[in-house]
Amino acid sequence: MQLQSGIGTRTGMALAAALAATCTSLGVDLTVSSVEVNQAIKLTTTTLVGNKSTFVRVKVGVADSPSGVANVDGLLHIYADGVEIPGSPFYSNNGPITAPLAPSMTELDATLNFEVLPPISDDVDFVVELNPGHLVVESDFANNGGSLLNQAFKCRDVVELAYVPVNYTPGGGVPPAWMMAPGMGDNFLRGIYSAGEWNYHVSPLPPLLWTQNINNSNNSLLNTLKDIRINQIPAAGYDKPDFIYGWLPGNPYSGNGQAIGIPGDAAFGNTEATRYQRTFAHETGHLIGQSHNNTLINTVGIDVEHHLWNSQSIAQVMPTSKKDVMWAGQLTTAAWVAATTYNKFLINAAAACASDNDDAGGAGGNGNDAPGTVLRICGEIDHATRQVALSPVFQVPLETPTADDPNGDVRFELLGPAGDVLATIGARTNTSPESCNGEEMLPSSPFYVFAPMSVGRSAVAGVRMVDVATGAVLGERLASAGVPSVENLVVETAGNGPQPDAKGGPGQAKLTGTIHVSWEGVDADGDPLTYNLLYSPDNGGSWLPVAVNLTETSFQFESNQVPSSKGGPARFRVRTSDGFNNGEAEEVVAMGLGDGNPPFVYLVAPNGGDAFPQHACVILHAAAWDMEDLMLNDEQILWTSSLDGVLGTGVELPYSDLSVGLHTVTVTGIDSDGMETSDAQVISILPRTIFSPDM
């Protein structure tokens, strides 16, 4: 304590004695009762994830006071491998608080709360300084420290999930774009599943046209979504997403949503306002291998970035009475995540880092064969009658045959030209029998396998599906004598014709606006034909499916729904199947397609209207993806403030020095062509009593 100039030593000693007496008479003593780290839920068995928004709650002990103590604040030091991390120490995000005598973790402001971004490390220490500025007069300042030591924050990978807007013509058309967008459609998903980051983005295809009643075609829709995921492999620069999800307008499906399997890689769901965010997370839970349950979360949860405030106005603290997300048929307000589901995601192969040795689960090929062209065999099966509807067989590039499942309930016999069995593939068809409306089991489900084009020197000329238990033939597809073909493939604009390329020189033009593609299918055997429409943005280097499983001989889409062509003319290809044989035709357009696409950029957190005390760590979180560049990197994402100017770059940027006042925080994504998109939210920074660690 520094004495004011002019006060003598004797007087100073008297003042010190008086202050000590006052402290003793007040008798208030603050301590750190506990330090809790939370990334959706808090359990001792929960794995923590590095470089992910994390909630640290400090419970304050209050002694010798008849009531709660006001004006309590603190600082949080974070050390990784013994070294204090940048930005540390951190001010609380809600202080000063009135520390209650009996704090309840179900009340957000009953604890001092810090939102931070710990690094990946097996040795992270959290050290708390309580009441560092001595804003509360205590009888003992020596016991104001607390800590949580030796915490491990593991690496988790980016999980890619592409979403498909379904143009559902029996009712509703395409769902509203804002409901499906990052920072809205994926809010529940982001809140409960701890990926290193979610690369959740729209599929680089036009909306999926669906003309059939969804309650009669749910399995076909799932197989089509899987087709879109699998056929994205040959697209220019596109990696196959880990999962794919289709959004229906409103809630036309009786079961809210459905997954292709448990585990699986494709699902669909509704956009009904009160349930769609939870339905998305629920169906993703099936895809990672989780079945339905009737489990309460039984611990206090935290929506760390408060994602569910958007559109749902759900409080940040999740009480123990919330239901696990896998409890079927629930509204978004009723659910959160229990430990079993949370941990199931953490060990999924999609979330595992390259160096991670966890026992990861998940579906996939056999992993032994080099990728090549395979036969896609899919359809649906009625579990009671064992009746099967086999879809047309299509050739799919750059895939591996499905691994044989010796415990499968069916086997696919691959037939040679003479009808002999060349090889078999066992598979299970009962991996998704659960109805997600919580009332009944599904009567049927989809199946989907890949078979080799040939076995040894013999080409596969047919496939037969057999019930393992009875030996009954459930269905078959055989090659007919005639091979189908495609003729008169025409690509044109459906309006104003070619438009000048804004980035090109004189005389250069590209097709833009509404693109209309038409063709004729020919088959000497008169078999019904199914078509896939492909487009190459890189002059034939790779092929992106614009539409799959068409029965019509034309398709229309907007040029900004696919990547613009580069390095040559646009190329289109139509592939057809007569049930087993495949044929195709290609058309080279004399000019390119599209003028390039700006990136999709969304401000995920914080929410508009959020308020933070001065010097609180605000986690700025964005989602940014580009048709041509894919997921934007940290350097391509710029954050600015209307008061403080440039804040920095990154998908997630922790920032503690925003000025007091009203800020319009803007995130801007800039792609490699210099095209940019911005999103913004208004937040408030409130004044607080400033103290420093050395006070």
Image: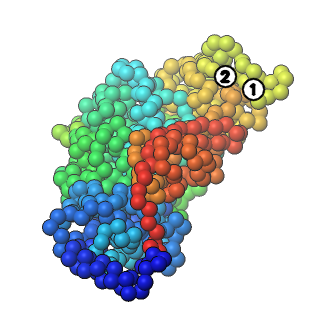
Q: Residue at x 22, y 48 (%)?
A: 327
Q: Which mark is residue 271?
A: none
Quadrant in the rendering for residue 105: bottom left
- For residue 89, side relative to residue 253 (left or right): right
Q: Residue at x 51, y 74 (%)?
A: 84
How would you rate the neighbour count of disc 1 (Cα within 10 Å): few for under 14, some for 14-19, many for 20 or more? few
Q: Nearer the viewer, residue 67 or 354?
A: 67
Whole-percent x, y for residue 98 in the image: 26, 60
Q: Which mark is residue 512?
A: 2
Dot 1 corresponds to which residue? Answer: 502
Q: Nearer the viewer, residue 112 or 693?
A: 693
**Mark pair 2, 1: CA separation:** 11 Å
- Compared to residue 188, the image places residue 66 above or below, namely below
Q: Residue at x 64, y 42 (%)?
A: 670
Q: Amino acid at mark 2?
A: Thr
- Compared to residue 553, the image places residue 259 above or below, namely below
